Image (cartoon, helix red, strand yellow):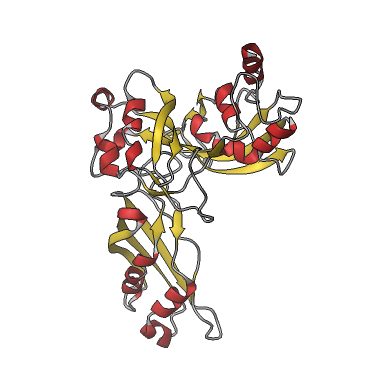
């Protein structure tokens, strides 16, 4: 029975020796692999429905590669067979990947890769039990958790391994944990660590008590559910002025009503049809933005800057990024564009603000 289990894991393979590069800009050096999922990590996210039916499958995902080599903004390009869960299983694997980032003029830049992943080797239905004594049918896994709370930038920087910090070395670690009924983490173990020998995994595990899962829409019972988080230790975060936070995700944006209500009356009276404002803010507890200041305002004499500052309480972003970086304590810039439609229609906000690390 033990030999059978090992054989099943061994033939769950990663498809292809390399991913097709889709650089966001033309780099001088393309991204390359540093770490890919192991067969056991592939098995850990194998779709339950596919296991029950004994189905093989494959999926292709498209992801951006951060300057630290982590995958983020991943989307499913294709999956076969459809509707079984192989696409989401592939995305759940992304914290197990690590790449050498693309380079432009000697600096790491964001690029994109298309990654095929093959889930193959079962061939026959497994029922609710796999040889070797591990019950996979009742195991539940949350691959892309949304966190209500997570370590701050200062807490993550404080956990930076001393030896790595002294050498100016960055690293990553992916930690797997069980969820409690209170949406906290317990029984955490290391899934991967790069490079080894510097204490990145230990540092990442020390942060586990700071993570709290956001409430689930259906208030599901989380006992027995497993999840994972990745921590990226970037040398830039050791400089308190840089506050490296990667690219956050917006979880709340101003409503159309809030934008309409804040459109400056003088600008409307003068027939000003639009404006662009950029504000810079600090990310506070829970992903709220605070301490905002106007960076630019065009046109500048009609109150659009103050209107944009009034919208700040309506913005909220994720407290932890897909690249494994904190956001709380970091800085973001919010470009906000106002556009007044013709025929005295209600003004609306055009486009989605983008968060960027800044100083």
Query: Residue 263 falls in which quadrant of the image?
Result: bottom left
Q: Is residue 292 visible?
A: yes
Name the residue furthest bottom: 269
Q: Depth check: 345 or 211 in front?
A: 211
**As drawn, 209 above or below 342:** above
Q: Is residue 28 visible?
A: no
Query: Which quarter of the image is occupied by the N terminus?
Result: top right
Q: How many marks?
A: 0
User: Which residue is rendered at x = 65% and y = 20% of the image?
Assistant: 131
On the rendered structure, is 88 left or right of 186? right
Residue 200 rendering spot, x and y as whole percentages = 34, 26
Does residue 193 lie above or below 249 as drawn?
above
Left or right of residue 140, residue 242 in this image = left
Q: Position of residue 146 (x, y in %)?
A: 46, 48
Residue 326, by quadrant, is top left
Of residues 254 and 133, which is closer to you in this image? 133
Kindly give the residue lying farthest to the top in the view shown. 3
Residue 239 in the image, given as x and y percentages of width and height: 24, 39
Q: In front: 252, or 266?
A: 252
**Is 133 placed above or below 88 here?**
above
Residue at 66% over, 40% down = 85
Name the residue nearer the viewer: 45 or 110. Answer: 45
Q: Residue at x 71, y 27 (%)?
A: 126
Picture coordinates of residue 242, whole percent (x, y): 28, 43
């Amino acid at each position: 029975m033990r030999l059978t289990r090992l054989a099943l894991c061994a033939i769950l393979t990663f498809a292809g020796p390399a991913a097709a590069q889709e650089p966001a800009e033309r780099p001088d050096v393309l991204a390359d692999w540093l770490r890919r999922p192991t067969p056991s990590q592939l098995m850990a996210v194998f779709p339950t429905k596919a296991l029950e039916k004994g189905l093989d499958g494959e999926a292709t995902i498209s992801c951006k590669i951060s300057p630290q080599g982590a995958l983020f903004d991943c989307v499913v390009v294709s999956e076969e067979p459809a509707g079984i869960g192989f696409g989401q299983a592939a995305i759940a694997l992304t914290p197990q990947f690590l790449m050498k980032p693309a380079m432009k003029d000697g600096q790491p830049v964001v690029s994109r890769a298309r990654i095929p992943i093959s889930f193959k080797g079962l061939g026959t239905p497994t029922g609710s039990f796999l040889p070797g004594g591990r019950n996979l049918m009742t195991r539940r896994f949350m691959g892309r958790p949304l966190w209500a709370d997570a370590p701050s930038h200062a807490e993550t920087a404080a956990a930076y391994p001393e030896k790595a910090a002294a050498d100016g070395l960055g690293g990553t670690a992916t930690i797997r944990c069980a969820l409690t009924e209170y949406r906290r983490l317990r029984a955490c173990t290391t899934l991967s660590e790069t490079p080894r020998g510097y204490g990145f995994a230990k540092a990442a595990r020390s942060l586990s008590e700071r993570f709290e899962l956001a409430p689930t829409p259906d208030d599901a019972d989380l006992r027995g559910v497993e999840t994972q988080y990745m921590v990226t230790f970037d040398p830039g975060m050791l400089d308190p002025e840089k506050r490296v936070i990667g690219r956050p995700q917006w979880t709340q944006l101003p409503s159309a009503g809030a934008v309409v209500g804040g459109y400056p009356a003088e600008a409307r009276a003068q027939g000003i049809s639009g404006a662009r404002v950029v504000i810079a803010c600090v990310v506070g507890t829970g992903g709220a933005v605070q301490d905002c200041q106007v960076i630019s305002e065009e046109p500048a004499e009609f109150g659009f800057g103050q209107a944009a500052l009034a919208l700040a309480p309506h913005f909220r972003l994720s407290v932890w990024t897909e690249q494994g970086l904190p956001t709380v304590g970091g800085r973001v810039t919010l470009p906000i564009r106002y556009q007044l439609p013709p025929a005295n229609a209600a003004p609306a906000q055009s486009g989605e603000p983008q968060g960027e690390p800044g100083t």
